[in-house]
Image (tube, grey):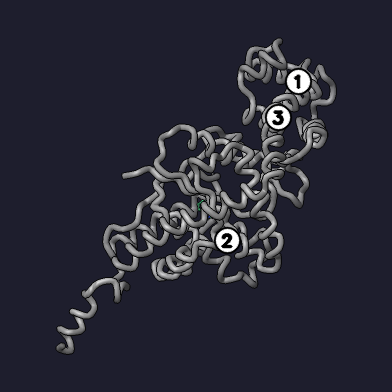
Amino acid sequence: MPRIILTGDRPTGRLHIGHYVGSLRPRVQLQNSGEFDKILIMIADAQALTDNADHPEKVRQNIMEVALDYLSVGIDPKIATIFIQSQIAELTELTFYYMNLVTVSRVQRNPTVKAEIQMRNFEASIPVGFFTYPISQASDITAFKATDVPVGEDQKPMLEQTSEIVHKFNSIYGDVLVDPNIILPKNDACLRLPGTDGKAKMSKSLGNCIYLSDSEADIKAKVMSMFTDPNHLKVSDPGNLDGNTVFTYLDAFCNDEHFEKYLPEYKNLDELKAHYQRGGLGDMKVKKFLNSIIQAELEPIRNRRKEFEGNIDYVYNILKEGCAKARDIASQTLKEVKSAMKLNFFDNSEYLDELHKRFGK
Ligand code: TRP
């Protein structure tokens, strides 16, 4: 069986370093591993509209921001197909059939949907489209026969629902759909990078994100004002690592070479952590180290982004070609699905033969 990756993001804003360590960087590694036969990356504008019906312009504008972020982190359009969800009509058709395989109470139990309903104060007025987006996400995944879906931990419930739909479909209609694997980030810090203020979630409205497109000065200001241990007042005080955002970021970003280059007094992060816990290591020094690392990682990304911004026709064509390619694949799967469901009345003589048997020629 060919190994196929499908993943995506809602275009509701520029991507930040939480997206970077949790999903973009691993995607580039998977892409460059050469282990996959096909890689598809979807800009999920239709899904973004399920809770942004009033803000179509925001979604429309962010499609290009996300595409630029993809290309600048190293997604290679020669290897990966980047496409826009709304352009693949087949996905909505699949969703309509899958809806019959899922109960309302099952969707209500989806923990991510539950949390999102609360976060958006939707309780009394949940848009039906939003409520059913996990089913549409099952279409996104199965339309491309994805075997592997690299996503953040919050997407686990979507993958579980997808598996259930796959099993139900295959048991009723025959083996057509592929049951996908989830690929989660390997390290805990990457799984859930907190905001610079130490809050669990990075969000635009909280102003606690470092964006991939932030300037050098912005990054520095954000790192220098990061949340650490509030009881670590004097350099000589012993410091606490729990919930200390600077160290969580180091867990996500730093390796031993960074020490050699920027902080040779220490061999590795364990040594630095031990010194901090013992006392005698100031926050400023650790923040400066983190700043050097993040700057080194984001500078080439920012520069590539500028290049792509100056070559927007090229990016436009990548999306256009990506959509055509994605549509070919999805329409092939939809054909198989409809034929398994015997909804292919005019594709062959089966239906007419059946009618002849019932009604005579
Ligand atoms: N739900 C994902 C998010 O909020 C986006 C998404 C839509 C997706 N369809 C997908 C991710 C299919 C993986 C596979 O970011």
Is the CB–ligand 1 distance for label 2 below 8 Å?
yes
- Residue sitting at 39 percent across and 52 percent down? 145
Note whether 270 is above or below 335 in the view shown. above
Helix or strand or loop: what does disc 1 sit on? loop
Which amino acid type is marked by label 3?
A: Ile
Q: Nearer the viewer, residue 67 or 216?
A: 67
Q: Earlier in the sequence, mark 1 or mark 2?
A: 2
- Residue sitting at 84 percent across and 21 percent down? 234
Q: CA distance from mark 1 to mark 2?
A: 47 Å
Which amino acid type is marked by label 1?
A: Pro
Say which residue label 1 marks: 238
Residue 21, percent across and down? 61, 36
Question: Badge 3, how many Cα within 10 Å: few under 14, some, many 20+?
Answer: many
Residue 333, percent across and down? 37, 59
Residue 230 visible? The answer is no
- Residue 31: image tag: none
Say which residue label 2 marks: 47
Q: Earlier in the sequence, mark 1 or mark 3?
A: 1
Note whether 98 is above or below 254 in the view shown. below
Note whether 304 is above or below 257 in the view shown. below
Q: Give left or right: position of 309 versus 9.
A: right
- Residue sitting at 28 percent across and 58 percent down? 175
- Residue sitting at 71 percent across and 36 percent down? 302
Helix or strand or loop: what does disc 2 sit on? helix
Say which residue label 3 marks: 294
Q: CA distance from mark 1 to mark 3?
A: 26 Å
